[in-house]
Image (cartoon, rainbow, N blue to C red):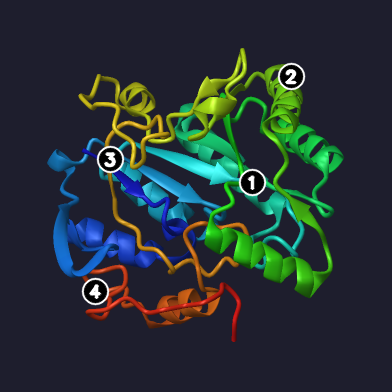
Amino acid sequence: MIVSASYKTDIPAFYGDWFLNRLHAGYCMMTNPYNRHQTYRVSLHRQDVDGFVFWTKNIGPFLDKLSEVHSLGYPFIVQYTINCYPRKLEFSVTDATRSLRHAAEIARQYGPRALVWRYDPVVFSSETPVETHLENFEWLASRLEGLTDEVVISFAQIYRKTRRNMDWASREFEFDWTDPDDQQKRNLMRELLRIARSHRMQLTLCSQPDLLEPGVQEARCVDARRISALLGREIQSRLKGPRKECGCFESKDIGDYDTCPHGCVYCYAVLNRKLAQERFREHDPEGEFLFKHAAHAETAPTLFEA
């Protein structure tokens, strides 16, 4: 079993102590996000875990813990999001130059196969027009060349809660945003593909198969092939992502929604930032659960409402 930690929240940035405590305990407890009365146990024993996928926008607080994960014999992939977006879109994400140093440290210690760069999601706004994306992507790719062989992109998917939060931020900080048609997205993707190739990276697209273009591959963010290469032997896993558009291999995610305090206004995993901040403050690093939910789900109308 591959364990995902986690596409629902940033465990390396905020919950590293909890993760390491659960790793030593050999298990963690999870709550079904669709039925708060249902809980289940996930084994983290080495014999039950083929490898970990860590999703993060700031691996810095986790670097020493990553070393311990490695010393315990667990292979892992770091899916590292580095966008270089303005604060109007990402309230508290660490500076990109710091993230680049962290990425270099991961590649140096564990090899470039352990690192995947994410430029994700691509948000179209007056703060991030096409020209800005091309400049950001070129600047980041030039500094990540040789540290990874893959860059994952996706275009922001505008769910109802995402639209609400983007609309709030655009009013609050006076910028415009849009969700352009597919052709405009493909035009940008072709340019990103050209840049990625020039820096010896494969461009992959996450969970949007209808937008695939020649030369762009479907992303497998949870990738049994990459973990097999790190482990030195093939692991058995089937293609079974968490949603039908997803190209990932099967995994068990141990995160929880509405627990990431980063404050990214486009995020699909956080409806209410205040709630996420409260849960982060209240979480118990010694507890079995990342966050122990009440028997009912809290209602939270917007991401940033006081």
Q: Looking at the rendered structure, which numbered label has been put on residue 248? A: none
Residue type for callout 1: Ile
Measure the C-alpha gap from mark 1 to mark 2.
Answer: 19 Å
- Of callouts 3 and 1, which one flags the residue occurring earlier in the amino acid sequence? 1
Q: Nearer the viewer, residue 212 or 144?
A: 212
| Residue found at x 45% / y 57% | 12
Measure the C-alpha gap from mark 4 to mark 3.
Answer: 23 Å
195 left or right of 135 in image: left
What is the residue that sits farthest to the bottom in this orientation? 306
Measure the C-alpha gap from mark 3 to mark 1.
Answer: 24 Å
Q: In terms of image quadrants, where is residue 118? A: top right
Label 1 crowd (10 A; few <14 / some 14-19 / many >=20): many
Q: Looking at the rendered structure, which numbered label has been put on residue 287? A: 4
- Of callouts 4 and 2, which one flags the residue occurring earlier in the amino acid sequence? 2
Q: Looking at the rendered structure, which numbered label has been put on residue 194? A: 2
Residue of label 3: 251
Measure the C-alpha gap from mark 3 to mark 2.
Answer: 32 Å
In the image, residue 150 above or below residue 20:
above
- Of callouts 3 and 2, which one flags the residue occurring earlier in the amino acid sequence? 2
In the rendered image, residue 50, in percent from the top left (x then y), is placed at 23, 35
Helix, strand or loop at disc 4? Answer: loop
In the rendered image, residue 264, in percent from the top left (x then y), is placed at 61, 62
Helix, strand or loop at disc 1? Answer: loop
Helix, strand or loop at disc 2? Answer: helix
Q: Nearer the viewer, mark 4 or mark 2?
A: 2
Label 4 crowd (10 A; few <14 / some 14-19 / many >=20): some
Q: Nearer the viewer, mark 1 or mark 2?
A: 2
Label 2 crowd (10 A; few <14 / some 14-19 / many >=20): some
20 left or right of 118 in image: left
| Residue found at x 67% / y 67% | 91
